[in-house]
Amino acid sequence: MNGPRKVYIKSYGCQMNVYDSHRMADTLAPEGYVETDRAENADLVVLNTCHIREKAVDKVYSELGRLREMKDEAALAGRRVSIAVAGCVAQAEGKEILRRERAVDLVVGPQSYHRLPDLLRKAEREGHALDTEFPAEDKFDFLAPASREATRKRGVTAFVTIQEGCDKFCTFCVVPYTRGAEISRPVAKVIADVERLADTGVREVTLLGQNVNAYHGDGPDGKAWTLGQLLWRLAEIPGIARLRYTTSHPRDVDDTLIAAHRDLPALMPQLHLPVQSGSDRILAAMNRQHTTKDYLAVIEKFRVAQPALCFTSDFIVGFPGESDDDFQATLRLIEDANITTAFSFKYSPRPGTPAAEMDDQIDEDVKADRLGQLQTLVNRQHERFQQSCVGRTLDVLFEKPGKFDGQITGRSPYLQPVQVMGHPSLIGNIAPVTITGTRTDAKSLFGVVAQPAAQPHNAAVRPVVRRRRTNSWRRCGCR
Ligand code: SF4
């Protein structure tokens, strides 16, 4: 064999898929695979698919058509290329993928990707391999940890999955079928992962889960820990300066989480709390298991505990039966909760979900019109929030060089991209930045470093003190 084999992994969808893709690369590394960012150079192409977006399955098949041509050309040149389909479309479609697309060598569901090396060997032996089981073993016990080099390359922010699956069964969603029931990783394993990341210079960790605040992992005291408890413990790890988590369900918010937002300086003041609709009738049809009143009450509790918190959310417009009044209620909720950013989509049926069978499917033109209105409102609120930051000084974690010479870019506590002219040595550090303006589309902020970064890269920072402290973000009102 000449040199290492190359793997190209294309991630679709959410941060959990990006995280899974990293872990697949880590699992393949001991097998001699190195990552490449070009499919044409790869010996193995993995499509890590997502089933959430519209026409997800069609998009995967059309991508596979392109890869088939690439694979055929490589074969003519005497080079073998393997193609794997992973993720939620793999789980939902299963062997149908192998039937419809001859180029595919293996199909692996999200709970089985730790078996990738074995599946590749099986595909080589038998022509193809399929694993869409929900195995009894915990895949995280079998995944190779990322090498120090791989972690460094991925930068100063990282994701860690702490929870997977969902028991909620919203009527529009495939996740409970593709990811299985809710499970939580034990506290000790999460701590070990975050310590390893901190050791390689990671400063900010985002904890991931389909229902991350339903977390109930086994703690060292033999009891199930909540997300709030876990956050406190992770904040004690030297080097970890910032913590975030996503995605939450309003029903699973508990007092420990609210208290963490009140008292834990490392927990950033931005919370993604999906609601989907502002109409109780539609929420019931979606089986969301909460009302708009419940949602606003949860937001109010958070805001009383931590007035600086900003909220982002998810919305689906044009759910079956959604009337104009229902939609107007959604717009009102966006204003009442002051949602500053949102992922918003037109409803599209997912085969096998109850909503796909419902009467009163909404006309596409109506959906498009409602989506436009909703996005205009959210953009307006976002712009207002961005403008409210001008003139303030915010802590920025610098992540990488910017687009222009001499520019570096980072993130504010609210996840806003912030660009400054600054020395690259600031990358990996947190420094106060005075915000001087916003980009014309208000997507990012510009600023000047207010003073040199206090903390050297990877130093122990921010000893955890259980009392309120004045962070720059605590002065940045977004209401
Ligand atoms: S809470 Fe609802 S939307 Fe979220 S993953 Fe579970 S079923 Fe899907």
Image: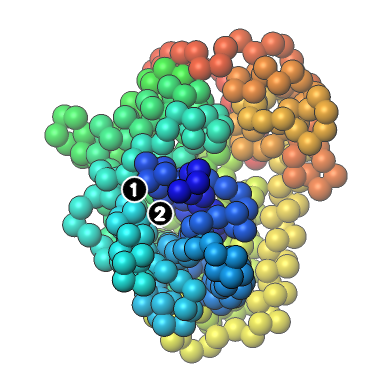
Q: Residue at x 27, y 45 (%)?
A: 142
Q: Total label count?
A: 2
**Which label is found at residue 238?**
none
For disc 2, does the CB lie below 8 Å from ligand 1?
Answer: yes
Q: CA distance from mark 1 to mark 2?
A: 7 Å
Disc number for residue 210: 2
Question: SS for tag 1?
Answer: strand
**Residue 340 place in picture, x, y as percent:** 65, 48
SS at circle 2: loop
Front position in the image: 62 or 173: 62
Residue shown at 32% from the left, 30% from the top: 191
Residue plotted at (34% across, 40% down): 144
| Mark 1 vs 2, N-terminal side | 1
Q: Is residue 140 above or below residue 233?
A: below
Going by the numbered disc 1, the residue's amino acid type is: Gln
The numbered disc on residue 163 is 1
Q: Tell me the crowding category of disc 1: few under 14, some 14 to 19, or many 20 or more residues within 10 angstroms, Cα based.
A: many
- Asked if the residues shown at circle 1 and circle 2 are in contact, with their CB atoms under 8 angstroms apart, the answer is yes
Image quadrant of residue 323? bottom right
Label 1 CB sits under 8 Å from any ligand 1 atom: no
User: Please, is residue 127 above or below residue 445 in the view?
Assistant: below
Report the front residue among 69 and 288. 69
Crowd band around label 2 with a 10 angstrom C-alpha radius: few (<14), some (14–19), many (20+): many
At label 2, the amino acid type is Gln
Is residue 232 depicted above or below 457 in this figure? Answer: below
